[in-house]
Image (cartoon, rainbow, N blue to C red):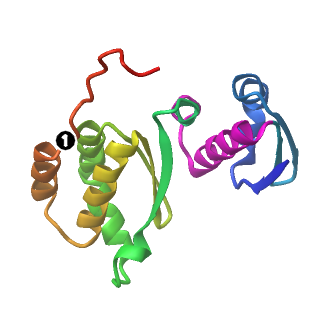
Amino acid sequence: MKTIICDKIVRVIKGKRKLERELGVKITNKGKEVSIDGGPEDEYIAEKVIDALGFGFPFSTAMLIKEEEFMFEIINIKDHTTRKDLKIIRARIIGKKGSTLKTLCELTKCFFEIKENQIGVIGNPEHIKNAEEAITSLIRGAKQSNVYTHLEKNQPKEVLDLGLKE
């Protein structure tokens, strides 16, 4: 049994039945406290999905974490800069009308959400590594065009499955 605190509890309550059915766990809540009961692996995945929902990701995107090839990571802006004007840094990451964030989504094949001074990323582990590098470069003041060029040159190679894996 795991217990976590969720700020956006309404989103969890709305999708409670679907979460329980798809993740194979029992979810109960008291206020902002959410208890998850199930197998250890199911509890871990449910915790990550609920964290993603609480962070602000749409339900369909948060449910991608259930698949083995998707992860959820949080990047804290304050860990990568000493600047005090975090509003400007967030604006650099979002871009005009969300253009920078949209381009990052396309180049990294990841999903992004920004909440206060944190950035949530859902994607493949290889793609998340590239996404984290891109975000930290933007936080440190790199030009968007330089970050895009770096991402285009350093795309992870697709692994060919020859049917040898079990």
Q: Is residue 153 magenta?
A: no
Decide if residue 27 is on the left or right side of residue 95. Answer: right
Q: How many marks?
A: 1
Task: Determine the residue positioned at 28% across, 51% down.
Answer: 130
- For this rendering, which residue is in front, 152 or 164? 164
Where does residue 23 sit, x and y in percent of width and height? 70, 29
Where does residue 156 sit, x and y in percent of width and height? 23, 40
Q: Which residues are magenta?
A: 39-61
In the image, residue 150 sits, relative to residue 45, either above or below, namely below
The image quadrant of residue 13 is: top right
Query: Which is the main secondary structure of the residues drawn in magenta?
Result: helix
- For this rendering, which residue is in front, 46 or 34? 46
SS state under label 1: loop
- For this rendering, which residue is in front, 108 or 89? 108
Residue type of the residue flagged with mark 1 = Gln
Task: Determine the residue positioned at 76% across, 55% down.
Answer: 4
Q: Is residue 48 magenta?
A: yes
Instruction: Point out the residue furthest to the top here.
Output: 163
Task: Determine the residue positioned at 16% across, 56% down.
Answer: 147
The image quadrant of residue 139 is: bottom left
**Looking at the image, can residue 11 be seen?**
no
Decide if residue 58 is on the left or right side of residue 119. Answer: right
Where does residue 6 sit, x and y in percent of width and height? 72, 53
Where does residue 26 sit, x and y in percent of width and height? 84, 34
Which residue matches tag 1? 155
**Looking at the image, can residue 93 be seen?**
yes
Task: Determine the residue positioned at 74% across, 47% down.
Answer: 9
- For this rendering, which residue is in front, 54 or 159? 159
Q: Residues within 10 Å of mark 1 (few under 14, many from 20)?
A: some
